[in-house]
Each structure stands twice: as structure tokens, then as C-alpha cells.
Image: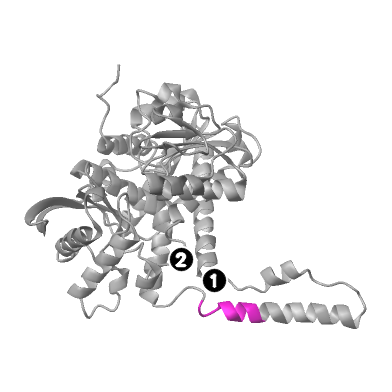
């Protein structure tokens, strides 16, 4: 029998917050100030579509302004409500603090199913939503900077940026009002892949810590590890693609809305994504066996489970049957607080969402900085780096020739050494450094405190301490 009495998403976040605060020496007043959501704006607006007026409900929640601007995505989904948006805004606060991006936490949502509207209609709805938020400074480069989330992407962010610019014609930094834009609208290379790439970097860093890996019972590195991915959206697809192509992991199952595909020899994420785009689901894909009840694959025998879709998919009803020794939360809140307790008691190691999926906000930070600086990363230094590298290569080859040493640099080495870093390389380098540094702070906290039993609590402790330090600096 299913248990439907679990706390909601907002309560889950608060439970995890309180679990971490119990390990800290914070005054009750400061702890409560960090926990609460500062404000939530609810807007109801009408748009004339198909000969009639439709009314839409949207939200923009600001959890913490210990740093400004506040940052957080906008999602389009029929189940969006105030509690969900506030929970996601809270996670953004802790996420930004954990990876040291100078933002407070915010989140937005619009209650609609984007699949029911064509592109022109979605543009009308998005522009009106953006107008309602921007006129209240809930979209502003210096105060509140949205980004894509579930149901939105580059297209919607471009519409929002253009709407803001139309309303603020003399704001030279207008493009910085939102991140996740397409390149030709002020975006940055590597943003689309950022969250999935961050998941890959998080796993790579975890496997660089033998003591942490030993707690899972796994050995070695990511090569050959059997992975189940739930959700092949932007995040799940890129995580699966990079782990398969660059780390030699094996994607043995992919779970989607209409079922799952299983193949012990491995699934090609590119081929499966193409099939889904053409057919609307995974059923009929030739690269594996179709399973109608996809949720059962969450309980499959595997090394790593990657929930990359909705919150609450691992809950009190299935947690006891989860077999993966390592779970990485690519989605926000995929494991409920009750399930978290069950899994922790079983010894399952969970790499938590506020760290694991922070790649998106990290690269959004880079995009925001790019928009404010009005220059592409690498433009000033790339050719200078190449010229300095060429000087060294030429001198080495001259010395070899003059002294008859008889050796020469391999063409592949020369090509790679002489190539200055472009924007994508710099973004990936910055993201990898961020994910590695953040995990090291979490792991250190995990090992330093004998009473901290899991990475989630350790991550919350690191984040809360940083938010508290910011409030103390303000005089609170």
C-alpha cells in the first residue's frame, strides 16, 4: 500500500535544513532568518489565445538576499505551485553558497503545460509573464536574474531578455537580466550542457576520494560502472552522454515518461534521444528492451543511479528496494526526506542535489559576468597565449637542431600545446574547478564531524555556514 502522508517538497527541504543546523552553533534567530523564504510574488495575467482570453498563474520567490542579485530558474509545468517554487528557491540559496557563486536564492514558475501551445503562443505568454515580473524588479541584472529550468530553455530566455530590453532601453547591462540565452543573444558556450557536465565532474571528483568510494563498496574509477538514468531531458542526456563517451561508463537503463529502455551492453544516449524526439517516447527503440513500468528500473541492480527528472521519485514507498550503492541527484529533490533516512540507514551514499546539479548556476554565473563585462571569454588572451607557446616550441626545436639532438615534438602535442583556450574550454575549466573545490569542502566536513553521517548534511552545513557568515557581515 502506498504511503501518501510524506511531507511535501518544501517541508523536505526544511527537514534537511534543520538536520544540518543541529550540528551548528547558530542562534535560533539567525537560523530562522536563513531558513525562511523572504517573499513570494504571485501573478495572474491574461493572454488572448485562439480567440479567447486565458488566465495564467505564475510565481517568483526570493528566498534569501544575503547576496544580490538573487538567482534561480523559471520552470513551466502544470503542477507548479507556491510551495514547490519556495522549496526550489531555498535550494538555490544553499546551492549558490556551496559553490561560491555570489548570488542569493530565487525561483520562478508558470503553471502551464508548454506542450499544449505552439511557439507563437508560448512567446506571447512568456513575454507577458516577463513584463509582469520585470516591472516589479523581479527580473533585473542587479536584483533578480532568472535562468532556464524544466519546460524552458534558450528560446524562452531570449524572449525574456528581449522583453526586459524593450522595457529598459537605456540599460547597457540589459542582457545580464537572464542567463541561459542562446549565443547570438548574449549566451555563453557550454551553458546548455552545464548541469549535465557538472554531474559528470561531481562523479569524477567523488571517485578521486578512495575513502569516500570505499563506503559504497565500489572500486576504481567510473570506467565500466553500470548506470541507470531516470529522465533523458537536458540534464540526464548530457550526463549520460559524457559519462559514456569520456569515462567509459555503461548506461544500462534509461527511464522516461512512457516506460524504460534496458540494455546490459549499454545504451547510446544520442540514438535514444533522437528516437524520443521523433516518436514522443522510448517505446519501440531498437537499442534495448522496452519496459512499460519504467519506475521499477529505479530499483534495478546497478552501480550508480542518476535521478534527473522530477522531485520525489524516490520516496518511502520504494526506497527500501533501491539497490544502487551510489545515487547522484541530478534533479532537484528526487529523494524525499523519509527516503533519505531509509537509504542512509541502508548505507547508500547520496551525492546531494544542492551540489550535484550546481553546474547550471555556476555557468550561469560565468554568463552573467560575461554580459556585464561585454566581452567574450578568451578574446583578449587566447592569441597571446598561443604566441608565447610558439616561442617556447620554436626555441626547443632550434636547440634540438643546433645541437644535433635528433628529437622532435609530436604533431599532436604541438597542436594541443599551441592552442590557446577558447570560451568553451575556459567555461569547462571553471566549472570543473568549482565542482572539485565544492566536493572537497563537503568531504572534509563529512570526515571532520563524526556525528555527520551523510554528504547531504555535510553540504548543508557548508552552505549554511557561508550564508550565516554573509548575514553576520551585514550586522545581523
Between 64 and 380, the one nearer to me in the picture: 380
Mark 1 is surrounded, within 10 Å at the Cα level, by few (under 14), some (14 to 19) or many (20 or more) other residues, namely: some
Between 236 and 452, the one nearer to me in the picture: 236
Comes first in the chain, label 2 or label 1: 2
Residue 472: x and y in percent read 32, 55
Residue at figure coordinates x 45%, y 24% from the top left: 345
Q: Is residue 335 left or right of residue 305?
A: left
Structural distance between the alpha carbons of marks 2 and 1: 9 Å
* In contact (CB < 8 Å): disc 2 and disc 1: yes
Residue 258: x and y in percent read 36, 35
159 in the magenta segment: no
> Is 270 located above or below residue 123 in the figure?
above
Secondary structure at badge 1 equals loop
Coloring applied to the structure: one colour
Instruction: Decide if residue 40 is in sight here.
Output: no
Mark 2 is surrounded, within 10 Å at the Cα level, by few (under 14), some (14 to 19) or many (20 or more) other residues, namely: many
Residue at figure coordinates x 57%, y 77% from the top left: 382
Between 385 and 249, the one nearer to me in the picture: 249
**Could you tell me which quadrant the N terminus lies in?**
top left
Q: Which residues are magenta?
A: 379-387
Between 474 and 108, the one nearer to me in the picture: 108
Q: Which residue is mark 2?
A: 189
Q: Which residue is mark 1?
A: 422
**Could you tell me which quadrant the C terminus lies in?**
bottom left
380 in the magenta segment: yes
> Is 206 located above or below residue 337 in the figure?
below
Q: Main secondary structure of the magenta part?
A: helix
Work out which residue is located at the far left of the displayed protein and give it. Answer: 52
Q: Is residue 263 left or right of residue 314?
A: right
Residue 213: x and y in percent read 59, 36
Amino acid at each position: 500500500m502506498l504511503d501518501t502522508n510524506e511531507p511535501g517538497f518544501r517541508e523536505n527541504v526544511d527537514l534537511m535544513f534543520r538536520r544540518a543546523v543541529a550540528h551548528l552553533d547558530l542562534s535560533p534567530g539567525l537560523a530562522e532568518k536563513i531558513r525562511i523564504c523572504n517573499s513570494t510574488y504571485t501573478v495572474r495575467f491574461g493572454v488572448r489565445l485562439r480567440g479567447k482570453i486565458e488566465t495564467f498563474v505564475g510565481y517568483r520567490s526570493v528566498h534569501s538576499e544575503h547576496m544580490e542579485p538573487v538567482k534561480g530558474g523559471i520552470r513551466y509545468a502544470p503542477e507548479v505551485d507556491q510551495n514547490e517554487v519556495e522549496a526550489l528557491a531555498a535550494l538555490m540559496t544553499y546551492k549558490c553558497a556551496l559553490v561560491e557563486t555570489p548570488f542569493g536564492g530565487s525561483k520562478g514558475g508558470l503553471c502551464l503545460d508548454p506542450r499544449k501551445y505552439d511557439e507563437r503562443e508560448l512567446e506571447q505568454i512568456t513575454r507577458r509573464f516577463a513584463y509582469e515580473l520585470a516591472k516589479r524588479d523581479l527580473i533585473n541584472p542587479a536584483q533578480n536574474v532568472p535562468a532556464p529550468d524544466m519546460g524552458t530553455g534558450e528560446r524562452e530566455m531570449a524572449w525574456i531578455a528581449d522583453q526586459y530590453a524593450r522595457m529598459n532601453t537605456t540599460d547597457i547591462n540589459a542582457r545580464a537580466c537572464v542567463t541561459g540565452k542562446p549565443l547570438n543573444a548574449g549566451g555563453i558556450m557550454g551553458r546548455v550542457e552545464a548541469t549535465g557536465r557538472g554531474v559528470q565532474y561531481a562523479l569524477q571528483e567523488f571517485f578521486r576520494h578512495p575513502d569516500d568510494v570505499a563506503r559504497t563498496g565500489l572500486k576504481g574509477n567510473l570506467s565500466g560502472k553500470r548506470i541507470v538514468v531516470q529522465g533523458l531531458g537536458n540534464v540526464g542526456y548530457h550526463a549520460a552522454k559524457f559519462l559514456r563517451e569520456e569515462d567509459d561508463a555503461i548506461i544500462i537503463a534509461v527511464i522516461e515518461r512512457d516506460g524504460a529502455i534496458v540494455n546490459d551492453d549499454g545504451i547510446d544516449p544520442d540514438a535514444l534521444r533522437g528516437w524520443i524526439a521523433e516518436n514522443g517516447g522510448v517505446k519501440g527503440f531498437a537499442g534495448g528492451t522496452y519496459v512499460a513500468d519504467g519506475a521499477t528500473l529505479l530499483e534495478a541492480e546497478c552501480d550508480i543511479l542518476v535521478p534527473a527528472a522530477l522531485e520525489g521519485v524516490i520516496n518511502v514507498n520504494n526506497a527500501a528496494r533501491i539497490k544502487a550503492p551510489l545515487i547522484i541527484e541530478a534533479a532537484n529533490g528526487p529523494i524525499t526526506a523519509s527516503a533519505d533516512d531509509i537509504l542512509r540507514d541502508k548505507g547508500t551514499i547520496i551525492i546531494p542535489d544542492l551540489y550535484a546539479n550546481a553546474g547550471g548556476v555556476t555557468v550561469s554565473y560565468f554568463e552573467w559576468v560575461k554580459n556585464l563585462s561585454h566581452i567574450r571569454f578568451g578574446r583578449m588572451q587566447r592569441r597571446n597565449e598561443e604566441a608565447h607557446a610558439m616561442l617556447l616550441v620554436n626555441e626547443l626545436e632550434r636547440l634540438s637542431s643546433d645541437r644535433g639532438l635528433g628529437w622532435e615534438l609530436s604533431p599532436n602535442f604541438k597542436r594541443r600545446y599551441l592552442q590557446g583556450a577558447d570560451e568553451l574550454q575556459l567555461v569547462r575549466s571553471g566549472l570543473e574547478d568549482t565542482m572539485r573545490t565544492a566536493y572537497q569542502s563537503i568531504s572534509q566536513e563529512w570526515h571532520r564531524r563524526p556525528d555527520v553521517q551523510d554528504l547531504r548534511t555535510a553540504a548543508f552545513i557548508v552552505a549554511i555556514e557561508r550564508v550565516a557568515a554573509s548575514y553576520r557581515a551585514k550586522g545581523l
